[in-house]
């Protein structure tokens, strides 16, 4: 089997409502579909969800856009992939790194499509190619975006009514608002609901972050995610806070994971396939975390069903990924199992909804990523 071509299609899904977080200055719901064809008729799909204004703690990573992903995929990677064996993924990953530095979102989308092809050629789900399931499902954490306290409480309560068991609460712009909101949620929600405050580096000073942590000690908050920027400041917060601190923007690559472990900069790591550059390097981050005894989650930028299927496969098969995942419950229009929980888009480009029960996404058992793409929807939503 040989690769015959790579093409990239920017598209956008209709959103249920606006979702914002600290550092995000664009709407969610814009993607690049990567389609890789072969001489045997198999087609693999991958996805990038680039955000121009979101990146790591000091601007060393990130900043990709729809245009950059399309350009890298079609003008640089495509011509080198034609004629190659799509199952030689390790060699292709190494080659992509030699062709262009950075651009992890574009590389991740290509590697994702290669795994989809590989699984389809064998009739095997990707999560089994990655080692097989170590859990029956992946617990979903619904993201409550930056909004006023009343709106946030209503969003959270409605998500929990849908069976959601964990929430990621966006904050970081107003410490007092964040404290008020988390306290209100803990009073109103069932005791079993796990709460995670994500500041997206927004508390500019260690003292502010520690004040928030101290004020929330009696709220049984489960985690605070990326309260400050920079490993030195993260280390101070992690050492002083009583609740676990999760690193997100501070950890993109396996090298970042090593630095974070060495600096004792967090108690847990939020893994994105796109930050690392694909399944392989995300697996290296997870291996470093596991060796250091740090739990992880699988997270992202609220992907469409393609990226979400990849996230689900990784989370099912990765032992340290035990923290609820901030990923959607993907479904086409009219088929979503939830009114609010995990419901970010009014439609998607797959033909069937993902299985969802007791607050968790269930394995996709079809070959490859386990999804069927509705090409009419791709054309409908193409930019």
Image (cartoon, rainbow, N blue to C red):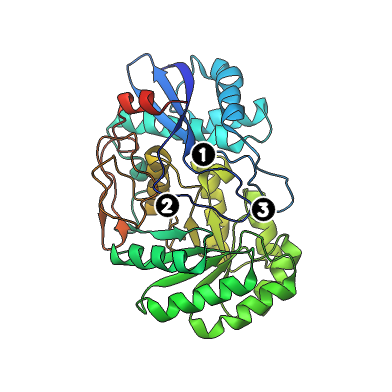
Q: Secondary structure at mark 3?
A: helix
Q: Is residue 157 above or below residue 113?
A: below
Q: Quadrant of residue 51?
A: top right
Q: Nearer the viewer, mark 3 or mark 2?
A: 2
Of residue 307 and residue 263, the one placed in the foreground of this image is 307
User: Which residue lies under the disc numbered 1?
Assistant: 49
**Is disc 1 surrounded by few (<14), some (14 to 19) or many (20+) residues within 10 Å?**
many
Q: In the rendering, which numbered label is found on residue 256?
A: 3
User: Which residue lies under the disc numbered 2?
Assistant: 327
**Is disc 3 surrounded by few (<14), some (14 to 19) or many (20+) residues within 10 Å?**
some
- Measuring from the top left, give residue 20's x and y in whole percent: 54, 53
- First in sequence: mark 1 vs mark 3: 1
**Is 248 positioned to the left or the right of 221 in the image?**
right
- C-beta proximity under 8 Å, tags 1 and 2: no
Q: How many angstroms separate mark 3 from mark 2 (CA)?
A: 23 Å
Quarter that holds the N terminus = top left
- C-beta proximity under 8 Å, tags 1 and 3: no
- Measuring from the top left, give residue 94's x and y in whole percent: 60, 31
- First in sequence: mark 3 vs mark 2: 3
The residue depicted at 57 percent of the width and 43 percent of the height is 26
Q: Is residue 63 above or below residue 214?
A: above
Of residue 347 and residue 306, the one placed in the foreground of this image is 347
Q: Secondary structure at mark 1?
A: loop
The residue depicted at 32 percent of the width and 24 percent of the height is 375
Q: How many angstroms separate mark 1 from mark 3 (CA)?
A: 21 Å
Q: Is residue 84 above or below residue 137?
A: above
Res 121 visible: no
């Amino acid at each position: 089997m040989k690769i015959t071509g790579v093409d990239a299609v920017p598209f956008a899904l209709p959103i249920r409502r606006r979702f914002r977080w600290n550092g995000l200055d664009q709407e969610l719901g814009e993607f690049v579909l990567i389609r890789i064809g072969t001489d045997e008729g198999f087609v693999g799909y991958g996805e990038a969800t680039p955000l121009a204004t979101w990146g790591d703690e000091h601007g060393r990573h990130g900043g990709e856009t729809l245009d950059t992903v399309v350009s890298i995929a079609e003008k640089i990677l495509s011509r080198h992939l034609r004629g190659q064996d799509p199952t030689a993924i390790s060699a292709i990953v190494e080659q992509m790194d030699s062709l262009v530095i950075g651009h992890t979102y574009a590389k991740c989308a290509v590697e994702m499509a290669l795994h989809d092809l590989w699984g389809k050629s064998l009739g095997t789900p990707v999560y089994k190619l990655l080692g097989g399931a170590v859990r029956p499902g992946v617990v979903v954490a619904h993201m409550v975006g930056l909004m006023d306290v009343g709106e946030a409480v209503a969003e959270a309560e409605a998500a929990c009514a849908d069976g959601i068991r964990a929430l990621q609460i966006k904050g970081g712009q107003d410490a007092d608002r964040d404290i008020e909101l988390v306290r209100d949620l803990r009073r109103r929600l069932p005791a079993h609901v796990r709460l995670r405050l994500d500041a997206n580096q927004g508390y500019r000073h260690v003292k502010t972050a520690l004040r928030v942590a101290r004020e929330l000690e009696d709220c049984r908050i489960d985690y605070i995610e990326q309260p400050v920027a920079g490993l030195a400041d993260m280390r101070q917060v992690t050492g002083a806070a009583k609740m676990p601190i999760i690193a997100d923007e501070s950890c993109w690559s396996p090298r970042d994971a090593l630095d974070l472990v060495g600096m004792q900069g967090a108690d847990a790591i939020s893994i994105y396939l796109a930050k690392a550059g694909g399944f392989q390097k995300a697996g290296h981050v997870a291996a470093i975390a596991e060796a250091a005894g740090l739990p992880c989650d699988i997270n992202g930028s609220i992907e469409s069903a393609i990226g979400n299927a990849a996230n689900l496969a990784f989370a099912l098969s990765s032992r340290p990924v035990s923290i609820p995942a901030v990923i959607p419950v993907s479904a086409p229009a009219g088929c979503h199992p939830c009114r609010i929980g995990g419901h970010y888009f009014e439609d998607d480009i797959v033909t069937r909804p993902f299985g969802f029960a007791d607050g968790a996404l269930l394995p996709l058992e079809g070959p490859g990523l386990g999804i069927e793409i509705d090409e009419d929807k791709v054309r409908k939503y193409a930019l």
